[in-house]
Amino acid sequence: MIKVIPIPIFHDNYVWLIRHAMQAGGALDHAVVVDPGDANPVLAYLAQEQLTLSAVLITHKCYDHVMGLGALLEQHTAPVYGPAIDHIKGVSHPVEDNAVITISQSLKFQAMLVPGHTLGHLAFYTRGHLFAGDVMFGAGCGRIKEGGNAEQMFYSLQRLAKLPRDTKLYCAHEYTMANLTFAQTVEPGNRAIAQRYDAVSALRKAQRPSLPSTLAEELATNPFLRCSEPEIAQSVCAHADIPVTAEIDVFTALRHWKDQF
Ligand SMILES: [Zn+2]
Protein backbone atom coordinates (compact mmCIF):
# COMPACT_ATOMS: atom_id res chain seq x y z
CA MET A 1 0.00 0.00 0.00
CA ILE A 2 1.18 3.51 -0.82
CA LYS A 3 -0.19 7.00 -0.35
CA VAL A 4 0.76 9.64 -2.90
CA ILE A 5 1.01 13.27 -1.75
CA PRO A 6 1.28 16.28 -4.08
CA ILE A 7 3.77 18.93 -2.96
CA PRO A 8 3.20 22.08 -5.04
CA ILE A 9 6.36 24.00 -5.97
CA PHE A 10 7.05 27.05 -8.11
CA HIS A 11 4.15 28.30 -10.18
CA ASP A 12 2.55 25.04 -11.32
CA ASN A 13 4.86 22.08 -10.62
CA TYR A 14 4.15 19.11 -8.37
CA VAL A 15 6.73 17.04 -6.55
CA TRP A 16 5.02 13.70 -5.93
CA LEU A 17 5.87 12.11 -2.59
CA ILE A 18 5.05 8.42 -2.23
CA ARG A 19 4.58 7.30 1.35
CA HIS A 20 5.19 3.60 1.91
CA ALA A 21 6.13 1.05 4.55
CA MET A 22 9.45 -0.79 4.55
CA GLN A 23 7.90 -3.96 6.01
CA ALA A 24 4.60 -5.49 4.98
CA GLY A 25 1.82 -4.07 7.14
CA GLY A 26 4.11 -1.43 8.67
CA ALA A 27 3.47 2.29 9.05
CA LEU A 28 3.82 4.50 5.94
CA ASP A 29 6.91 6.12 7.42
CA HIS A 30 9.17 6.06 4.35
CA ALA A 31 8.97 8.21 1.27
CA VAL A 32 10.04 8.12 -2.36
CA VAL A 33 10.24 11.60 -3.88
CA VAL A 34 9.77 12.23 -7.60
CA ASP A 35 11.42 15.26 -9.27
CA PRO A 36 12.43 17.51 -6.37
CA GLY A 37 12.75 20.79 -8.27
CA ASP A 38 12.73 22.64 -4.95
CA ALA A 39 13.99 21.07 -1.71
CA ASN A 40 12.45 23.22 1.03
CA PRO A 41 8.79 22.17 0.77
CA VAL A 42 9.90 18.52 0.52
CA LEU A 43 12.24 18.81 3.52
CA ALA A 44 9.45 20.47 5.49
CA TYR A 45 6.99 17.66 4.72
CA LEU A 46 9.54 14.92 5.54
CA ALA A 47 10.34 16.61 8.87
CA GLN A 48 6.74 17.33 9.80
CA GLU A 49 5.69 13.73 9.12
CA GLN A 50 8.96 12.23 10.44
CA LEU A 51 9.55 10.27 7.26
CA THR A 52 12.70 8.50 6.11
CA LEU A 53 13.64 9.25 2.52
CA SER A 54 14.04 5.87 0.81
CA ALA A 55 14.77 6.99 -2.78
CA VAL A 56 14.52 9.83 -5.25
CA LEU A 57 13.27 9.31 -8.81
CA ILE A 58 14.22 11.81 -11.52
CA THR A 59 12.22 11.76 -14.76
CA HIS A 60 14.41 14.16 -16.74
CA LYS A 61 17.02 16.84 -16.63
CA CYS A 62 14.97 20.10 -16.76
CA TYR A 63 15.96 22.41 -13.89
CA ASP A 64 12.47 22.51 -12.37
CA HIS A 65 12.73 18.75 -11.78
CA VAL A 66 16.25 18.49 -10.36
CA MET A 67 17.21 21.81 -8.78
CA GLY A 68 16.34 20.75 -5.22
CA LEU A 69 18.32 17.53 -5.37
CA GLY A 70 21.53 18.92 -3.82
CA ALA A 71 19.81 20.50 -0.82
CA LEU A 72 17.66 17.40 -0.27
CA LEU A 73 20.74 15.15 -0.22
CA GLU A 74 22.51 17.43 2.25
CA GLN A 75 19.96 16.38 4.85
CA HIS A 76 18.99 12.88 3.70
CA THR A 77 20.91 9.93 2.30
CA ALA A 78 19.10 7.94 -0.36
CA PRO A 79 19.74 6.44 -3.78
CA VAL A 80 18.81 8.69 -6.68
CA TYR A 81 17.54 7.01 -9.85
CA GLY A 82 17.51 8.94 -13.11
CA PRO A 83 17.97 8.62 -16.87
CA ALA A 84 21.30 7.02 -17.74
CA ILE A 85 21.87 9.02 -20.89
CA ASP A 86 21.43 12.42 -19.22
CA HIS A 87 24.33 12.28 -16.71
CA ILE A 88 22.43 14.41 -14.18
CA LYS A 89 24.49 15.65 -11.23
CA GLY A 90 23.38 13.85 -8.08
CA VAL A 91 21.97 10.74 -9.82
CA SER A 92 23.70 7.82 -8.10
CA HIS A 93 21.84 5.06 -9.96
CA PRO A 94 21.56 5.76 -13.70
CA VAL A 95 18.79 3.58 -15.14
CA GLU A 96 17.95 2.32 -18.61
CA ASP A 97 14.65 1.48 -20.24
CA ASN A 98 12.72 -1.28 -18.43
CA ALA A 99 14.99 -1.26 -15.38
CA VAL A 100 13.24 -2.45 -12.24
CA ILE A 101 13.88 -0.26 -9.20
CA THR A 102 13.34 -2.13 -5.96
CA ILE A 103 12.51 0.09 -3.00
CA SER A 104 11.14 -2.64 -0.70
CA GLN A 105 9.62 -6.14 -0.91
CA SER A 106 6.30 -4.64 -1.94
CA LEU A 107 7.31 -1.47 -3.78
CA LYS A 108 9.03 -1.69 -7.12
CA PHE A 109 9.04 0.70 -10.07
CA GLN A 110 9.55 -0.04 -13.73
CA ALA A 111 11.50 2.67 -15.55
CA MET A 112 10.10 3.36 -19.02
CA LEU A 113 12.15 5.35 -21.50
CA VAL A 114 9.69 7.79 -23.09
CA PRO A 115 11.62 10.30 -25.22
CA GLY A 116 10.02 13.29 -26.91
CA HIS A 117 10.09 16.13 -24.37
CA THR A 118 13.76 15.30 -23.81
CA LEU A 119 15.73 12.41 -25.28
CA GLY A 120 16.37 10.66 -21.96
CA HIS A 121 12.97 11.16 -20.32
CA LEU A 122 11.82 8.33 -18.02
CA ALA A 123 8.39 7.54 -16.63
CA PHE A 124 8.11 5.37 -13.51
CA TYR A 125 5.36 2.81 -13.17
CA THR A 126 4.32 0.87 -10.11
CA ARG A 127 1.14 -1.15 -10.21
CA GLY A 128 -1.80 1.28 -10.54
CA HIS A 129 0.36 4.43 -10.55
CA LEU A 130 2.29 6.16 -13.32
CA PHE A 131 4.68 9.05 -12.69
CA ALA A 132 4.96 10.60 -16.12
CA GLY A 133 7.01 13.79 -15.58
CA ASP A 134 6.59 16.08 -18.59
CA VAL A 135 5.52 13.46 -21.15
CA MET A 136 1.79 13.03 -20.54
CA PHE A 137 -0.16 15.83 -18.85
CA GLY A 138 -3.80 16.04 -17.87
CA ALA A 139 -5.46 16.39 -21.32
CA GLY A 140 -2.12 17.23 -22.93
CA CYS A 141 1.50 16.34 -23.47
CA GLY A 142 4.91 17.96 -23.01
CA ARG A 143 6.57 20.28 -25.43
CA ILE A 144 9.18 18.91 -27.78
CA LYS A 145 12.63 20.10 -26.79
CA GLU A 146 16.24 19.23 -25.99
CA GLY A 147 16.82 16.50 -28.54
CA GLY A 148 13.31 15.08 -28.58
CA ASN A 149 10.99 15.05 -31.58
CA ALA A 150 7.26 14.69 -32.25
CA GLU A 151 7.51 11.14 -33.54
CA GLN A 152 9.23 9.99 -30.34
CA MET A 153 6.58 11.78 -28.29
CA PHE A 154 3.80 10.07 -30.26
CA TYR A 155 5.20 6.58 -29.59
CA SER A 156 6.02 7.41 -25.96
CA LEU A 157 2.42 8.47 -25.32
CA GLN A 158 1.13 5.37 -27.11
CA ARG A 159 3.34 3.22 -24.91
CA LEU A 160 2.09 4.80 -21.68
CA ALA A 161 -1.51 4.59 -22.90
CA LYS A 162 -1.20 0.79 -23.14
CA LEU A 163 -0.88 0.45 -19.36
CA PRO A 164 -4.05 -0.68 -17.55
CA ARG A 165 -6.86 1.87 -18.01
CA ASP A 166 -7.39 2.36 -14.28
CA THR A 167 -3.75 3.44 -13.80
CA LYS A 168 -3.54 6.78 -12.01
CA LEU A 169 -1.56 9.44 -13.87
CA TYR A 170 0.68 11.76 -11.85
CA CYS A 171 2.31 14.39 -14.03
CA ALA A 172 4.66 17.16 -13.04
CA HIS A 173 2.58 20.23 -13.92
CA GLU A 174 -0.88 21.59 -13.24
CA TYR A 175 -1.74 22.32 -16.86
CA THR A 176 -5.06 20.46 -17.10
CA MET A 177 -7.40 23.46 -17.30
CA ALA A 178 -5.52 25.15 -20.15
CA ASN A 179 -5.12 21.81 -21.91
CA LEU A 180 -8.87 21.15 -21.74
CA THR A 181 -9.57 24.55 -23.29
CA PHE A 182 -7.36 23.53 -26.19
CA ALA A 183 -8.94 20.04 -26.33
CA GLN A 184 -12.40 21.63 -26.65
CA THR A 185 -11.19 23.77 -29.54
CA VAL A 186 -9.80 20.71 -31.33
CA GLU A 187 -12.69 18.36 -30.62
CA PRO A 188 -15.78 20.44 -29.76
CA GLY A 189 -18.14 17.48 -30.20
CA ASN A 190 -16.55 15.43 -27.39
CA ARG A 191 -18.88 15.53 -24.37
CA ALA A 192 -16.32 13.86 -22.11
CA ILE A 193 -14.08 16.92 -22.51
CA ALA A 194 -16.90 19.27 -21.48
CA GLN A 195 -17.64 17.12 -18.42
CA ARG A 196 -13.99 16.98 -17.42
CA TYR A 197 -13.71 20.75 -17.92
CA ASP A 198 -16.50 21.29 -15.37
CA ALA A 199 -15.01 18.79 -12.91
CA VAL A 200 -11.49 20.26 -13.13
CA SER A 201 -12.85 23.78 -12.92
CA ALA A 202 -14.54 22.92 -9.62
CA LEU A 203 -11.37 21.30 -8.26
CA ARG A 204 -9.20 24.27 -9.18
CA LYS A 205 -11.68 26.77 -7.70
CA ALA A 206 -11.37 24.79 -4.46
CA GLN A 207 -7.56 25.02 -4.87
CA ARG A 208 -7.26 21.27 -5.26
CA PRO A 209 -5.04 19.52 -7.83
CA SER A 210 -6.66 18.22 -11.01
CA LEU A 211 -4.42 15.17 -10.62
CA PRO A 212 -4.09 12.28 -10.54
CA SER A 213 -6.34 11.49 -13.46
CA THR A 214 -6.67 7.97 -14.89
CA LEU A 215 -5.50 6.66 -18.23
CA ALA A 216 -9.16 5.96 -19.02
CA GLU A 217 -9.94 9.67 -18.60
CA GLU A 218 -6.94 10.60 -20.73
CA LEU A 219 -7.94 8.19 -23.49
CA ALA A 220 -11.38 9.84 -23.53
CA THR A 221 -10.30 13.50 -23.38
CA ASN A 222 -6.61 13.95 -24.26
CA PRO A 223 -6.35 14.97 -27.92
CA PHE A 224 -2.75 13.77 -28.12
CA LEU A 225 -4.00 10.19 -27.53
CA ARG A 226 -6.89 10.60 -29.95
CA CYS A 227 -5.28 11.50 -33.28
CA SER A 228 -6.96 8.52 -34.95
CA GLU A 229 -10.40 10.05 -34.24
CA PRO A 230 -11.89 11.44 -37.47
CA GLU A 231 -13.10 14.68 -35.80
CA ILE A 232 -9.59 15.42 -34.51
CA ALA A 233 -7.87 14.50 -37.77
CA GLN A 234 -10.26 16.76 -39.72
CA SER A 235 -9.99 19.67 -37.33
CA VAL A 236 -6.18 19.49 -37.09
CA CYS A 237 -5.67 19.12 -40.83
CA ALA A 238 -8.11 21.98 -41.55
CA HIS A 239 -6.22 24.19 -39.10
CA ALA A 240 -2.84 23.25 -40.58
CA ASP A 241 -4.28 23.53 -44.10
CA ILE A 242 -3.04 20.07 -45.10
CA PRO A 243 -4.96 17.09 -46.55
CA VAL A 244 -6.22 14.56 -43.97
CA THR A 245 -3.19 12.41 -43.39
CA ALA A 246 -1.58 9.62 -41.33
CA GLU A 247 -2.03 9.60 -37.54
CA ILE A 248 1.61 10.50 -36.83
CA ASP A 249 1.34 13.57 -39.08
CA VAL A 250 -1.93 14.59 -37.41
CA PHE A 251 -0.11 14.31 -34.08
CA THR A 252 2.80 16.46 -35.28
CA ALA A 253 0.44 19.13 -36.59
CA LEU A 254 -1.58 18.98 -33.35
CA ARG A 255 1.57 19.51 -31.23
CA HIS A 256 2.51 22.43 -33.48
CA TRP A 257 -0.99 23.93 -33.11
CA LYS A 258 -0.79 23.67 -29.32
CA ASP A 259 2.61 25.41 -29.33
CA GLN A 260 0.95 28.48 -30.85
CA PHE A 261 -2.37 28.27 -28.98
ZN1 LIG B 1 10.86 19.42 -18.67
Image: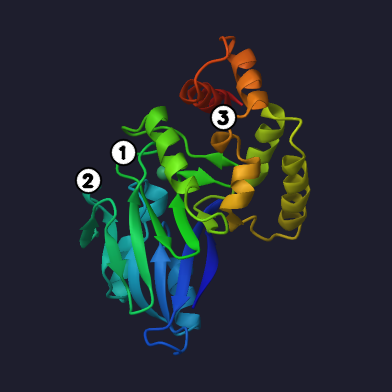
| First along the sequence among labels 3 and 2 | 2
The residue shown at (27%, 75%) is 77
- Disc 1 packing (10 Å; few <14; some 14–19; many ≥20): many
Q: Are marks 1 and 2 in contact (CB under 8 Å)?
A: yes
Could you tell me residue 85's position as x and y percent? 22, 45
| First along the sequence among labels 1 and 2 | 2
**How much space separates mark 1 and mark 2, taking CA atoms?**
8 Å
**How much space separates mark 1 and mark 3, taking CA atoms?**
22 Å
- Hey, what amino acid is under mark 1? Leu
The residue shown at (48%, 24%) is 252
Q: Which residue is mark 2?
A: 85
Q: Secondary structure at mark 2?
A: helix
Q: Which residue is mark 1?
A: 119
Give whichever of 58, 39 is nearer the camera.
Answer: 58
Residue 36 in view, yes or no: no
Q: Are marks 3 and 2 in contact (CB under 8 Å)?
A: no
Give whichever of 42, 219 is nearer the camera.
Answer: 219
**How much space separates mark 3 and mark 2, taking CA atoms?**
30 Å
Could you tell me residue 194's position as x and y percent? 77, 41
Could you tell me residue 53's position as x and y percent? 36, 76
Q: Is residue 56 left or right of residue 95?
A: right
Q: Which residue is mark 3?
A: 227
Q: Is residue 10 left or right of residue 186?
A: left
- Hey, what amino acid is under mark 2? Ile
| First along the sequence among labels 1 and 3 | 1
